Image (cartoon, rainbow, N blue to C red):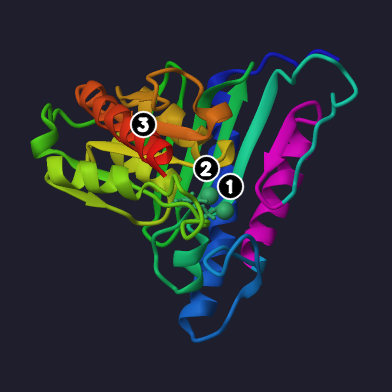
Amino acid sequence: MPSKLLSPAELLDTAVTLAHGAGAILLEGLTYIRAGNHAHVRYKSSPGDVVTEYDQRSEAFIVSELRRRYPDHAIVGEEGGAYDPQAAETQPPRYEWQIDPLDGTTNFSHGFGLFCVSIGLLIDGIPVLGAVYNPAADELYAAAHGLGATCNGKPIHVSRVNSLQQALLITGFPYDYAHNPRNNLRAFDAFNRRCQAVRRIGSAALDLCFVAAGQIDGYWEANVKAYDIAAGIAIVREAGGLVTDSAGEDAMLSRGEIVASNGLLQPAMLDVLREVHLSEAAHVVMR
Ligand code: IPD
Ligand code: CA
Ligand code: CA
């Protein structure tokens, strides 16, 4: 059955409402944890990769609301809330929601307030809309194609820094850092030598929103999933920034890697990553 055509404003309104609703669940969890309680449920890939009951409750809330409102949309949720009403059909779904119910779980599980809910929408595979809510800071970032990007309703824009030397960058490291030969350490070192500073806060969705808001000039990361970055990509683009993979192409979601910036820094960031990849390849050949 073809999906009913929905306006970007209507879809964004849903994403914002659900991000606020899920954020309230996470805020309840933060209060519980800050009172000295443990919300930890289990480890996933490594001791740094935890899931809490709040990841699960947040996702259950978002998925059930989306299914009620848009029964013909596909949904991918990090904690297993996948739903594809067209799975039996050959065509990929027109509308696909990408949900990270708690991005920055490690921070959250320590009571550290840098985490968020991230709700992104792909239309025909392209990230067109996103709502990212950090309930601890009460900051809601939102954007939809053609409508601009906002933080708590106020327009945001990427920075104007045009040299790497003056840039503040942000990145992340994979959970399998100890065993992954492409664990981002070489790139981190290469950027750290060339820019003003590199930060790592542990939430890919917030990293992208900080670029959109012009507080951070550029972000790169590998080993990310579509639900980590779909919302943030739409927000950075609507804030005037550029988002590609490390080859400068548009395959962020399928390759699981991303470079986002104010646009002015994109060529320099891609150059650094190209250099790093070449030196990594040479290193592998020499071993
Ligand atoms: C993680 C965060 C982190 C990034 C990891 C993600 P999670 O998500 O976004 O910043 O470096 O790649 O997996 O596990 O907290 O939802
Ligand atoms: Ca995540
Ligand atoms: Ca998560």
Give the mark nearest the N terminus, 1 or 3: 1
Mark 1 touching mark 3, by CB under 8 A?
A: no
- Looking at the picture, which amino acid does disc 3 mark? Val
Q: Which residue is mark 3?
A: 259
Q: Is residue 156 above or below residue 26?
A: above
Question: Magenta residues?
Answer: 54-79
Report the side of 57 relative to 29 (left or right): right
Q: Which residue is mark 2?
A: 228
Q: Give the residue at the far right of this rendering.
A: 88
Q: Is residue 133 above or below residue 4?
A: below
Q: Position of residue 111 (x, y in %)?
A: 44, 73
Which SS does the magenta portion mostly show?
Answer: helix
Q: Is residue 213 visible?
A: no
Mark 2 touching mark 1, by CB under 8 A?
A: yes
Q: Residues within 10 Å of mark 2 (few under 14, many from 20)?
A: many
- Cβ at disc 2 under 8 Å from ligand 2: yes
Seen at 42% across and 26% down, the residue is 245
Q: Residues within 10 Å of mark 3 (few under 14, many from 20)?
A: many
Q: CA distance from mark 2 to mark 3?
A: 13 Å
Q: Is residue 260 magenta?
A: no
